[in-house]
Amino acid sequence: MIHSKIGINLWNWVPAFSDENLQLIEHVASLGFDVIEIGMMALPFDYKRVGELARSCGVAIDLCGAFTQGRDISNFDPSVRESTKAYFRACFDAAEQMGARLFVGPVYAGGSKAHLLGPDERQMEWDLAVQGLKELCAEAFGRGIVIGLEPINRYRTSVVNTVEEALRMVADVDSPALGILYDTFQANIEESDPPRALARACKEQKLVHFHASENHRGPPGSGYIDWKPLFSELAWANYQGHITIETFAPGGMDAPWNQYVVDPDLRATQGLRFLSDLIAENRIAQN
């Protein structure tokens, strides 16, 4: 039995969160969620006010990095790497002001960097990611922030696609501030056995976050992902982290061209009901 709160990324409603969307915090809480996850696409916004609203509504905050092109810690251009470090630090500053303690995403590279490299260049790229993350994880640890490294699919990156690769990078960085974010959409593309991959992350005690969305980026339960064995692994591992729906509004960073559930509130509530039922079936206590 584990204690797990259910959250949702605000990308479900808006492609980029800003001060114009502060009402979403109360709205998401009213739908029954325990956690809001904010995609750090457009900075800054009123971090202090966001934290105050979240606390008043009784919801926790997680942050998800928006590693678009140019936000790339493993880039061969040192100026890009330095600007990416500045982005990390801005997100850490924001986390402190909002009261967030988790920062997740494909932290090793910028999105849209999927390329074929020779062995030497590929190792150099890997080493740059490890070197940069060592530095940033030391800063995160000092601030009480945990980083969740997310393996993502081949169309988005060529650096880390699988849990095995993620575990290797986490081992190379060797920081208590670094763990793994498991994303069901990404794993559905890259893992030959998604539950086994999740089990590996759990066995190594490196799972710090869980993103839930369907094979077509719809809400959990609307596609063909086999959820029961995944939640059995979470229950077996006594998972203590958040379970967060990651769906996208039209025009969002990873939005599908075909929205299988058009209304964002319906996407949210359908996913919440489905995950709540899975939690109950696995006797995972929500707290």
Image (tube, rainbow, N blue to C red):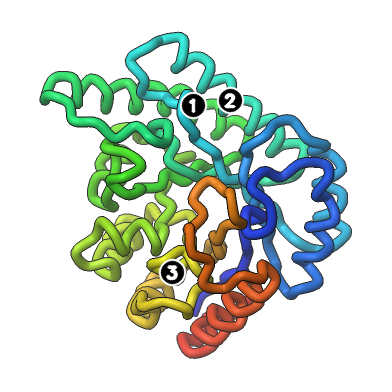
What is the crowding at mark 1: few (fewer than 14 residues within 10 Å), some, or many (at least 20)? many
Upstream in sequence: badge 1 or badge 2: 1
Few, some or many C-alpha atoms within 10 Å of disc 2 (few <14, some 14-19, many ≥20)?
some
Q: Is the C-beta separation of discs 1 and 2 under 8 Å? A: yes
2 and 3 marks in contact (CB < 8 Å)? no
Residue 192 vs 130, above or below: the answer is below
- Sequence-wise, the earlier of marks 2 and 3 is 2
The front one of 139 and 92 is 92
Residue pushed farthest front? 258
In the rendered structure, find residue 71 and report the number of the disc placed on it.
1
Query: Judging from the image, what secondary structure is the residue with disc 1 in?
Result: loop
**x%, y% of residue 263?**
66, 71
Compared to residue 172, the image places residue 1 above or below, namely: below
* Residue 287 makes an appearance in the image: no
How far from the left and from the top, in percent, is residue 190? 25, 56
Q: From the image, tell me which residue sits under label 2.
A: 87
Residue at horizontal 64 percent and vertical 47 percent from the top: 15
Residue 214, disc: 3
Please give the name of the residue rendered at 32% of the width and 60% of the height, measured from the top-left corner: 187
- Depth-wise, is mark 2 or mark 3 nearer the camera? 3
Q: Nearer the viewer, residue 81 or 270?
A: 270
Check the image and report above or below for 26 versus 272. above
Amino acid tagged 3:
Glu
- Spatial CA distance of label 1 from label 2 is 8 Å
